[in-house]
Amino acid sequence: MDEHKIRELLAEVQSGRVDVEQALGRLRALPYDDLGDFARLDVHRGLRQGLPETVFCETKTPEQAAAILARLWQHHDRVLGTRVPPEMAAFIQAQLPEARYDATSRLIVLERTARAPLPDGAPYAMVVCGGTSDLPVAEEAAQTLEFLGHRVERAYDVGVAGLHRLLGELNRLQAASVVIAVAGMEGALASVVAGLVSSPVVAVPTSVGYGANFHGLAPLLTMLNSCASGVAVVNIDNGYGAAVFAHFVLRRL
Protein backbone atom coordinates (compact mmCIF):
# COMPACT_ATOMS: atom_id res chain seq x y z
CA MET A 1 0.00 0.00 0.00
CA ASP A 2 1.56 3.27 -1.13
CA GLU A 3 0.84 6.90 -0.21
CA HIS A 4 -1.71 7.26 -3.01
CA LYS A 5 -3.74 4.29 -1.76
CA ILE A 6 -3.56 5.50 1.86
CA ARG A 7 -4.90 8.89 0.79
CA GLU A 8 -7.72 7.23 -1.17
CA LEU A 9 -8.65 5.12 1.86
CA LEU A 10 -8.66 8.12 4.21
CA ALA A 11 -10.82 10.08 1.75
CA GLU A 12 -13.29 7.17 1.60
CA VAL A 13 -13.49 7.09 5.41
CA GLN A 14 -13.99 10.86 5.51
CA SER A 15 -16.81 10.70 2.97
CA GLY A 16 -18.49 7.76 4.71
CA ARG A 17 -18.09 5.33 1.79
CA VAL A 18 -15.88 3.12 4.01
CA ASP A 19 -16.49 2.72 7.74
CA VAL A 20 -13.75 2.62 10.36
CA GLU A 21 -13.84 -1.16 10.81
CA GLN A 22 -13.48 -1.74 7.08
CA ALA A 23 -10.56 0.68 6.96
CA LEU A 24 -8.89 -1.08 9.88
CA GLY A 25 -9.28 -4.38 8.06
CA ARG A 26 -7.49 -2.99 5.02
CA LEU A 27 -4.72 -1.49 7.15
CA ARG A 28 -4.05 -4.64 9.15
CA ALA A 29 -1.81 -5.90 6.36
CA LEU A 30 0.65 -3.13 7.27
CA PRO A 31 3.54 -3.29 7.69
CA TYR A 32 3.87 -6.81 6.20
CA ASP A 33 1.79 -9.62 4.79
CA ASP A 34 2.61 -13.25 5.61
CA LEU A 35 2.65 -15.60 2.63
CA GLY A 36 2.78 -19.19 3.79
CA ASP A 37 6.04 -20.22 5.44
CA PHE A 38 8.41 -18.72 2.85
CA ALA A 39 7.77 -14.96 2.59
CA ARG A 40 6.78 -11.90 4.58
CA LEU A 41 5.98 -9.15 2.12
CA ASP A 42 6.91 -5.58 3.04
CA VAL A 43 3.77 -3.91 1.72
CA HIS A 44 4.56 -0.79 3.75
CA ARG A 45 7.79 -0.08 1.85
CA GLY A 46 6.18 2.11 -0.79
CA LEU A 47 4.86 4.42 1.94
CA ARG A 48 8.24 4.55 3.71
CA GLN A 49 10.61 4.76 0.77
CA GLY A 50 8.52 5.84 -2.20
CA LEU A 51 8.97 2.59 -4.12
CA PRO A 52 7.41 -0.81 -3.41
CA GLU A 53 9.23 -4.03 -2.62
CA THR A 54 10.88 -5.61 -5.66
CA VAL A 55 11.07 -9.39 -6.00
CA PHE A 56 14.51 -10.94 -6.60
CA CYS A 57 13.41 -14.09 -8.42
CA GLU A 58 16.58 -15.90 -9.47
CA THR A 59 17.03 -18.24 -6.51
CA LYS A 60 13.34 -18.77 -5.81
CA THR A 61 11.22 -21.57 -7.21
CA PRO A 62 8.78 -20.58 -9.98
CA GLU A 63 5.90 -21.30 -7.59
CA GLN A 64 7.36 -19.04 -4.89
CA ALA A 65 8.08 -16.19 -7.31
CA ALA A 66 4.60 -16.37 -8.86
CA ALA A 67 2.91 -16.44 -5.45
CA ILE A 68 4.89 -13.45 -4.16
CA LEU A 69 4.25 -11.40 -7.31
CA ALA A 70 0.54 -12.26 -7.21
CA ARG A 71 0.19 -11.19 -3.58
CA LEU A 72 2.09 -7.93 -4.16
CA TRP A 73 -0.18 -7.38 -7.18
CA GLN A 74 -3.12 -7.38 -4.75
CA HIS A 75 -1.51 -4.55 -2.77
CA HIS A 76 0.09 -2.41 -5.50
CA ASP A 77 -0.77 -1.14 -8.98
CA ARG A 78 2.82 -1.74 -10.16
CA VAL A 79 5.05 -4.71 -9.30
CA LEU A 80 8.57 -5.54 -10.46
CA GLY A 81 10.51 -8.82 -10.43
CA THR A 82 14.23 -8.99 -11.22
CA ARG A 83 16.65 -11.71 -12.42
CA VAL A 84 13.88 -13.87 -13.85
CA PRO A 85 15.09 -16.85 -15.94
CA PRO A 86 13.07 -17.48 -19.13
CA GLU A 87 11.55 -20.75 -17.90
CA MET A 88 10.41 -19.07 -14.68
CA ALA A 89 8.95 -16.17 -16.68
CA ALA A 90 6.86 -18.63 -18.72
CA PHE A 91 5.50 -20.17 -15.51
CA ILE A 92 4.70 -16.75 -14.00
CA GLN A 93 2.96 -15.56 -17.16
CA ALA A 94 0.81 -18.70 -17.16
CA GLN A 95 -0.31 -17.76 -13.63
CA LEU A 96 -0.42 -13.99 -14.24
CA PRO A 97 -1.23 -13.29 -17.91
CA GLU A 98 -0.88 -9.53 -17.31
CA ALA A 99 2.84 -9.92 -16.61
CA ARG A 100 5.27 -8.54 -19.21
CA TYR A 101 8.72 -10.09 -19.53
CA ASP A 102 11.89 -8.76 -21.14
CA ALA A 103 14.47 -11.46 -21.87
CA THR A 104 17.44 -9.07 -22.07
CA SER A 105 16.96 -7.33 -18.72
CA ARG A 106 15.30 -10.40 -17.17
CA LEU A 107 12.69 -8.12 -15.62
CA ILE A 108 9.03 -9.02 -15.23
CA VAL A 109 6.50 -6.21 -14.76
CA LEU A 110 2.88 -5.99 -13.67
CA GLU A 111 1.12 -2.64 -13.98
CA ARG A 112 -2.54 -1.69 -14.10
CA THR A 113 -2.07 1.77 -15.56
CA ALA A 114 0.56 3.01 -18.00
CA ARG A 115 2.48 6.11 -17.02
CA ALA A 116 1.96 9.29 -19.00
CA PRO A 117 4.91 10.02 -21.32
CA LEU A 118 7.47 12.40 -19.88
CA PRO A 119 8.23 15.68 -21.67
CA ASP A 120 11.42 15.85 -23.72
CA GLY A 121 12.86 18.41 -21.31
CA ALA A 122 12.44 16.26 -18.20
CA PRO A 123 15.62 15.45 -16.24
CA TYR A 124 17.04 12.13 -17.33
CA ALA A 125 19.46 9.40 -16.43
CA MET A 126 21.97 8.27 -19.04
CA VAL A 127 22.88 4.60 -19.03
CA VAL A 128 26.13 3.74 -20.80
CA CYS A 129 27.89 0.41 -21.11
CA GLY A 130 31.28 -0.73 -22.30
CA GLY A 131 30.21 -3.52 -24.64
CA THR A 132 27.27 -5.47 -25.99
CA SER A 133 27.98 -8.22 -23.45
CA ASP A 134 27.04 -5.74 -20.69
CA LEU A 135 23.53 -5.21 -22.10
CA PRO A 136 21.64 -7.42 -19.61
CA VAL A 137 22.91 -5.37 -16.66
CA ALA A 138 22.56 -2.04 -18.48
CA GLU A 139 18.98 -2.83 -19.49
CA GLU A 140 18.13 -3.96 -15.97
CA ALA A 141 19.16 -0.48 -14.82
CA ALA A 142 17.48 1.40 -17.67
CA GLN A 143 14.18 -0.48 -17.53
CA THR A 144 14.02 -0.31 -13.73
CA LEU A 145 14.33 3.47 -13.96
CA GLU A 146 11.57 3.56 -16.58
CA PHE A 147 9.40 1.40 -14.31
CA LEU A 148 10.01 3.97 -11.56
CA GLY A 149 8.78 6.73 -13.86
CA HIS A 150 11.97 8.36 -15.13
CA ARG A 151 13.25 9.40 -18.52
CA VAL A 152 16.23 7.35 -19.66
CA GLU A 153 18.77 7.87 -22.44
CA ARG A 154 21.06 5.05 -23.58
CA ALA A 155 24.52 4.82 -25.18
CA TYR A 156 25.77 1.26 -25.52
CA ASP A 157 29.05 -0.27 -26.71
CA VAL A 158 31.04 2.88 -25.90
CA GLY A 159 33.91 1.26 -24.00
CA VAL A 160 37.37 2.74 -23.56
CA ALA A 161 38.92 0.51 -26.22
CA GLY A 162 37.39 2.95 -28.70
CA LEU A 163 37.15 6.19 -26.74
CA HIS A 164 35.88 8.19 -29.74
CA ARG A 165 32.56 6.30 -29.43
CA LEU A 166 32.01 7.69 -25.94
CA LEU A 167 33.13 11.21 -26.90
CA GLY A 168 30.51 11.18 -29.65
CA GLU A 169 27.90 11.09 -26.86
CA LEU A 170 29.44 13.93 -24.85
CA ASN A 171 26.56 16.40 -25.24
CA ARG A 172 23.97 13.92 -23.99
CA LEU A 173 26.26 12.78 -21.18
CA GLN A 174 26.86 16.30 -19.91
CA ALA A 175 23.15 17.13 -20.00
CA ALA A 176 22.19 14.09 -17.89
CA SER A 177 21.24 14.54 -14.24
CA VAL A 178 22.85 11.22 -13.31
CA VAL A 179 24.88 8.68 -15.29
CA ILE A 180 25.00 4.92 -14.80
CA ALA A 181 28.22 3.45 -16.21
CA VAL A 182 28.17 -0.32 -16.71
CA ALA A 183 31.38 -2.16 -17.60
CA GLY A 184 33.16 -5.48 -17.29
CA MET A 185 36.73 -6.37 -18.30
CA GLU A 186 38.91 -3.81 -16.42
CA GLY A 187 36.00 -1.43 -15.65
CA ALA A 188 37.71 1.82 -16.69
CA LEU A 189 34.57 3.28 -18.28
CA ALA A 190 33.21 4.74 -15.03
CA SER A 191 36.38 6.75 -14.31
CA VAL A 192 36.44 8.16 -17.84
CA VAL A 193 32.76 9.14 -17.69
CA ALA A 194 33.14 10.73 -14.26
CA GLY A 195 36.01 12.85 -15.59
CA LEU A 196 33.76 14.27 -18.30
CA VAL A 197 30.55 15.16 -16.43
CA SER A 198 29.45 17.22 -13.42
CA SER A 199 26.58 14.89 -12.43
CA PRO A 200 26.77 11.90 -10.04
CA VAL A 201 28.05 8.71 -11.68
CA VAL A 202 26.87 5.29 -10.53
CA ALA A 203 29.38 2.61 -11.50
CA VAL A 204 28.24 -0.97 -12.09
CA PRO A 205 30.93 -3.63 -12.51
CA THR A 206 29.85 -6.67 -14.50
CA SER A 207 31.07 -10.25 -14.47
CA VAL A 208 31.92 -10.01 -18.19
CA GLY A 209 35.58 -10.78 -18.93
CA TYR A 210 38.34 -13.36 -19.14
CA GLY A 211 39.81 -15.26 -16.20
CA ALA A 212 41.61 -12.43 -14.41
CA ASN A 213 38.37 -10.49 -14.43
CA PHE A 214 37.51 -12.81 -11.51
CA HIS A 215 33.78 -12.74 -12.36
CA GLY A 216 33.60 -8.97 -11.89
CA LEU A 217 36.02 -8.48 -9.01
CA ALA A 218 38.60 -6.73 -11.22
CA PRO A 219 36.22 -3.99 -12.47
CA LEU A 220 34.74 -3.67 -8.97
CA LEU A 221 38.18 -2.82 -7.56
CA THR A 222 38.93 -0.48 -10.48
CA MET A 223 35.71 1.43 -9.85
CA LEU A 224 36.26 1.57 -6.08
CA ASN A 225 39.74 2.99 -6.76
CA SER A 226 38.56 5.53 -9.33
CA CYS A 227 40.71 8.65 -9.50
CA ALA A 228 37.67 10.64 -10.68
CA SER A 229 35.42 12.28 -8.10
CA GLY A 230 31.71 11.69 -7.59
CA VAL A 231 31.59 7.95 -8.36
CA ALA A 232 29.32 5.66 -6.33
CA VAL A 233 29.85 1.92 -6.86
CA VAL A 234 27.24 -0.82 -6.53
CA ASN A 235 27.73 -4.57 -6.42
CA ILE A 236 28.73 -6.75 -9.37
CA ASP A 237 25.97 -7.04 -12.01
CA ASN A 238 23.63 -4.96 -9.80
CA GLY A 239 21.83 -2.88 -12.42
CA TYR A 240 18.77 -2.74 -10.19
CA GLY A 241 20.70 -1.22 -7.29
CA ALA A 242 22.22 1.40 -9.57
CA ALA A 243 18.77 2.32 -10.86
CA VAL A 244 17.38 2.78 -7.35
CA PHE A 245 20.29 5.07 -6.44
CA ALA A 246 19.68 7.09 -9.62
CA HIS A 247 15.95 7.15 -8.80
CA PHE A 248 16.66 8.82 -5.46
CA VAL A 249 18.81 11.43 -7.25
CA LEU A 250 16.18 12.15 -9.90
CA ARG A 251 13.33 12.21 -7.42
CA ARG A 252 14.96 15.17 -5.65
CA LEU A 253 14.91 17.14 -8.90
Image (tube, rainbow, N blue to C red):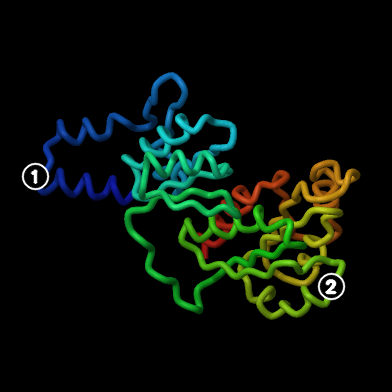
Which label sits on residue 163? Answer: 2
Q: Quadrant of the N terminus?
A: top left
- Of 114 and 60, which appears nearest the observer? 60
Q: Residue at x 16, y 47 (%)?
A: 12
- Residue 139 x/y as whole percent: 61, 58
- Residue 152 x/y as whole percent: 56, 67
Q: Secondary structure at mark 2?
A: helix
Q: Residue at x 76, y 69 (%)?
A: 158
Q: Amino acid at mark 2?
A: Leu
Q: Residue at x 11, y 37 (%)?
A: 19
- Residue 38 x/y as whole percent: 47, 23
**Res. 2 in view:** no
State left or right for residue 114 relative to residue 193.
Answer: left
Which label sits on residue 52? Answer: none
Q: Report the residue that reaches farthest toward the top.
A: 37
Which label sits on residue 16? Answer: 1
Q: Amino acid at mark 1?
A: Gly
Mark earlier in primary sequence (2, 1): 1
